[in-house]
Image (cartoon, rainbow, N blue to C red):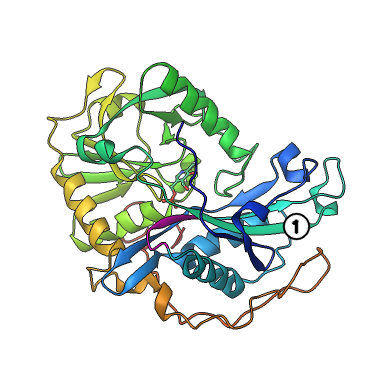
Amino acid sequence: MVGVRALKTIWLNGKLVDWNDARVHVLTHGLHYGYSIFEGIRCHETPRGSAIFRLSEHLDRFLNSAKVYRMALPFDKAALAHACIDLIQSNEIPEAYLRPIAFSGYGEMGLDPTKSRVEVAVAMWVWGPYLGDEGVRRGVRATVSSWSRIDSRSLPPQAKCAANYANSGLAKMEASSAGYDEAILLNSAGMVAEGPGENIFRVKNGVVSTPPASSGILRGVTRDSVIRFVADEPLPFQRTDFTREELFSADELFYTGTAAGITPIREVDGRPIGTGEYPITRLLQQRYEDAIHGRSDRYASWLTYVGEAPRSSSPAAGGRSVGRREKIMKREPLPATSGRSVRGSARGSSEEVGV
Ligand SMILES: Cc1ncc(COP(=O)(O)O)c(C=O)c1O
C-alpha cells in the first residue's frame, strides 16, 4: 500500500498547523455518521508557477454540498480560496491534490448533526492520476457493478458527501476483487450513471455523449470542462442516458474526474471498446492538459495562479473557531475568474450552467 507522503502543513479551522497536529477526536460526529462534505481540487505547474484548476467552481460545489446538508460553514468562499492558496504556498509543492473537507465535529452524538460544531480543513498531498499513468495512456478495464448508484430519493448524488462514497467503495472493491481497474455504476432505472469517483463519456459515430445530471451523477468539474472543449471544437454533443449494451457498442469511452483526469476505458466486461484507437479521447486529453498547465489562452480564466494571489497577511480566523452560531470568517474575494460553462439548451438536453 502506498501511503500519503507527509508534507509540512494542513489548514485546520482557520490556521495552518503542522501536518502531524491536524487531528480529530475519535468521537468526531462525522466519523460515525458519514456527515462530512468534501472537494477534490488539483493544482498544476504552469509557466507562471503553480495554478489551481477551476477553484471557483469547486468551492461553489463545496458550498452547495454544505447547503444541502444544512451545514453552516464558518468560512466564506473567499476565505476558503485563500486557505487553498496559503496551503500551497506553505507546502511549496506546485503539483498536488487538495482536499477541502467540512464535517460535524466532536461534542454531541446522535443523529442530528446540526448540534455539533462544524470543523473545516484543507489538506494537500502529491497524487498521480487516480487510475494510473498507464491507465491514462493505454486505457483501463472496467466492469458494470452489481451495486446501483445511490439516487436522490435516498442520498443526493450532487452533494459531495462522504456517505455517498460507501456506495462508491462497494463498487470499487467489487471491481478490484474481480481483477478490473474500475467500476461503472448503473442507476436505479438501469441506465449508465458514472464511475465510483468519475463521470463517464461515450463516443459513437463522432457524437460525444454523457449522462445528464438527472441520471444521478455528481456534476463533475472535469465533465463540465470536457463539455466546453467539445462545444469549442465543435463536435456534436448530447447529454443523454445510455444503456449497458451501449457501453459495449461505443467507439470510445472515457472517465473524467479531478483525480482520474481523462482516462480511456479500453474494455468493459471482456468486450474491447472500439478499435483500440481513441482519437476523440486523445484530442480531449490534449485540450485538458493544455488548460490545466496554462498553455491555453482560451481557458486561461479557469486558473488561479498561486504566486500571484494577494499574499495572506492575516490568516482567515486568526485562531480557533468557530461554533455554528459564531460569525462567518470572511475574506476579500480573489480577482474573478469566469468559469463559463456550456448552456445545456445549446448543446444537448437542458441542464443548468456550471457544476
Ligand atoms: C462520484 C463522482 N463522480 C464524478 C466525479 C468527477 O468530478 P470532478 O470532475 O469534479 O472531480 C467525482 C470526483 O469528484 C466523483 O466523486
Residue 276 x/y as whole percent: 14, 31
Between 49 and 143, which is closer to the camera in this rendering?
49
- Indicate left or right for 108 with 55 as reference: right
The residue at 61%/46% (across/down) is: 161
Name the residue carrying label 1: 118
Q: Is residue 271 above or below residue 58?
A: above
Residue range (magenta): 93-98
Q: Amino acid at mark 1?
A: Val
Picture layout, residue 47 above or below residue 9: below
Residue lying at 51% horizontally and 23% vertically, measured from the top left: 147
Q: Residue at x 49, y 29 (%)?
A: 189
Magenta run includes residue 239: no
Q: Is residue 336 visible?
A: yes
Alpha-carbon neighbours of circle 1 within 10 Å: few (<14), some, or many (≥20)? Answer: many
Q: Would residue 98 appear left or right of 163 to someone viewing this image?
A: left
Q: Is residue 20 above or below residue 275?
A: below
Q: Residue at x 51, y 41 (%)?
A: 216
Residue 287 in the image: state x and y as whole percent. 22, 58
The quarter holding residue 164 reads top right
- How many labels sit on residues? 1
Circle 1: element type: strand
Q: Is residue 262 left or right of residue 36?
A: left
Q: Where in the figure is residue 188, as x and y percent of width and height?
A: 52, 29
Q: Quadrant of residue 120?
A: bottom right
